[in-house]
Amino acid sequence: MNVAQTLDTFRNDAMFQRNLTAWRTIPARSARYGGFPEGVHPELVAGLRARGISDLYTHQSEAVAAVLTGEHVCVVTPTASGKTLCYNIPVLHTLMQNPDARALYLFPTKALSQDQVKELQGTIDGLDVKIGTYTFDGDTPSSARKAIRNAGHIVVTNPDMLHTGILPHHTIWMKLFENLHYVVIDEIHHYRGVFGSHLANVLRRLKRICAFYGSNPQFICCSATINNPKEMAERIVEKPVRLIDNNGAPAGERHFLFYNPPVVNKELGIRQSSVHVASRLASRLLSKDIQSIVFARSRLRVEILTTYLKEAVRKMHKDHNLVRGYRGGYLPTERRAIEKGLRDGEIMTVISTNALELGIDIGSLDVCLMTGYSGSVASTWQQAGRAGRRSDVSLVILVASSAPLDQYIINHPEYFFEQSPEDATVDPNNLIIVTSHIKCAAFELPFEEGEGFGLDPVSTREILEYLCEERVLRHARDKWYWSADAYPAQDISLRTAAPGNVVILDTSQNGRVIGEVDLFAAPVEVYENAIYLHQSAQYTIDRLDLEDRKAYARPVEVDYYTDAELKVDIKIINGDLEEACGDGRKCAGEISVTWLPSIYKKIKFGTHENVGWGEIDLPETTMHTASFWLEFPDDLGIRLTMTESELGEALHGLANILRQVAPVHVMCDLTDIRSFAVLRAPFTHRPTVYLYETYPGGVGISEKIHHHFEGMLDAALTLLGDCPCPGGCPSCVGPHLEIGEHGKQGAQKVARAITTVSAVGARSS
């Protein structure tokens, strides 16, 4: 059965139709061409035509022409629109004219790097030229590294390897830095938040080294659709960039369905599990031999779905290897085998986190299933783009969870389909991040008096003086020299707040490494007695050694998984932004947050009911970060005729729902922020709601929440008003039993009190 026939069965399925909130058909789009720009090397044009590329789409043509005239560019078109040629053509053109020229390609993952080398090598093989194209990453054997440094015209790597393996060793990469013409940054939308803030500083170091060797590279950026790609690119490369978004690529007809699982417990407002619905739909597609990708919001959900679908495929008497999970934490060889299996058609269903949202070559899939809203409009379209890479009809189904953000989107499809994708946030001048990279930059080249590093020279000097006091640098003859013994880059992770990862070892197989988690996530994922899932195999964690960064696991067979809970304490350090909000205040600034994993729940497979719990014995962790907070008048309870208990429930409910709607207005993941509410905050003794960032120092999300707060309040009130539950449920303020019976009505009262006064103030001003 093909996708068109599957669509017919869905149209005739009354039960399925009853739970749809939207069925949008996006018509097929014809190709628009712009031709090869004048001046492109004729042998290159002939080589491309021999590979079947007889013309360029409009965006490709415009991008190539702009790069060849010396402009920095940012190309923004949907998935599978041929962005690769936008940089490969000008790079190959330049290398054919000047064999000494060099190019550096940056991709966010090693898998993407390897994909690109294969495609690029195919083009080069058709040309009568010698152009060395090599991947340089952690998997590159040491025997090949010297050859790459000397003969690599195009070095394909990732920001992590540039940060730790190339920049600190620039003296042995002289040939690259002296002749560097182009820096290509693909999937730039991926570099939001902490990763993008780190990347901007890595590029500051790169440009500093290039200037030392006398080169000044051009930047070519590519992005999926976001609302502020030009601003994002310019904040990361810190140069003026030309936006190219005139997409000329063709696309097949796409059907986009919004499915809201039915309510199974009206009193508690609990809907049928999105995991169960996605599993059922994916099984249906599997039985019809339709190749699909299922996206899940977390590593845990990937493993749960993989478990369910492997069981389903066994019942069909088919090979269980037709179903595979895919996520971070799998070893590289395992991920490469899965990617190949998808391309070759040996794997029919892959269940993935957003690891496969990027443009890794996994062939042409027919259907994309999303288990829960991905958290942003941009990311959802990116995931949807993994289906229908041919000109055929494709299908995308978003299955909502009970989470408030999902319920807002699923019940307001016009918001999703008519809304511009969100702005991406990046803060290169986060004090912790910029200080870390100033250390790395000083290790690479001494700082000179009056030199700035992204910051102005005065601010840069203040950080250099601080590092002198800490005996990391020494100041002599108007220069700042590295003086510590340690090698700074190895202790700085670009992707997480904490350096390094925790590896998970299988003690039943002599300590074989079965996966890894980042240090920040380890206390809530691999604590003692946690159930760790890997390709549907179950392990229990016997011991977590944070100092040695190892978790010791052994195989088990149980009918539940585990979920950790945290205790939180917050202290305000300073408020950079403060503004009246009715009789209260909305603020953003720096806080100190201390958290402690306290207990874990055992959640039964299938029913998802709580079947037990246990204590977690780990030390507390303290972090300085950025936060948005809302301070209410200290007599709020009296004004709203609420008892202290009712007010506590209301604040807790409002904190939950504001956190859930924040990603609608601020492009971030739900995991980038946490919420907390107190009846009496330390120092002010006022009722306060906090939305704080999960990264040290923050990356600009809190400030953005401050600016978008009124829109967030409106969305929260709309979601509360639309939710049919009587007193609070997982689809609005949170589970009734956790929030309390007054959580929903109380949250509405508190939100309306602020909204009314804020709106009056806004109109009068």
Image (cartoon, rainbow, N blue to C red):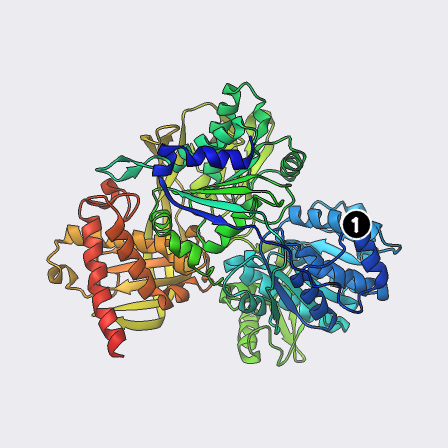
Could you tell me which quadrant the N terminus lies in? top right
Instruction: Identify the element where label 1 is drawn.
Output: loop
Count of numbered badges drawn on the protein:
1
Q: Where is residue 85 in the image (x, y as percent from the top left)?
A: 71, 57
Residue 612 lies left or right of residue 190; in this view the side is left
**Horizontal and vertical percent position of residue 451:** 62, 78
Give the residue number, with chain letter if any, for mark 1: 51
Where is residue 729, by image quadrant? top left
Residue 437 seen anywhere in this rendered image of the structure = yes
Q: Tell me if I can see residue 445 in this picture.
A: no
Q: Residue 4: image x %, image y %?
A: 53, 37
Give the residue drawn at x 43%, y 34%. 530
Residue 320, quarter of picture: top right
Compared across the picture, whether 409 is left or right of 87 comes to left
- Name the quadrant containing residue 489: bottom right
Q: Badge 1 local density, few (<14 within 10 Å), some, or many (20+)?
A: few
Relative vertical location of residue 367 with respect to residue 553 in this rendering, above or below: below
Q: Which residue is drawn at 39% across and 55% down?
A: 414
Tag 1: residue type? Arg
The percent position of residue 181, horizontal first and vertical second, equals 75, 67
- Image quadrant holding the C terminus, namely bottom left
179 relative position to 513: left or right? right
Q: Which of 61 and 132 is in front in this view?
A: 61
**Viewer-closest of 326 and 585:** 326
Q: Which of 206 and 751 is in front in this view?
A: 751
Relative to the observer, which residue lies in front, 17 or 375?
Answer: 17
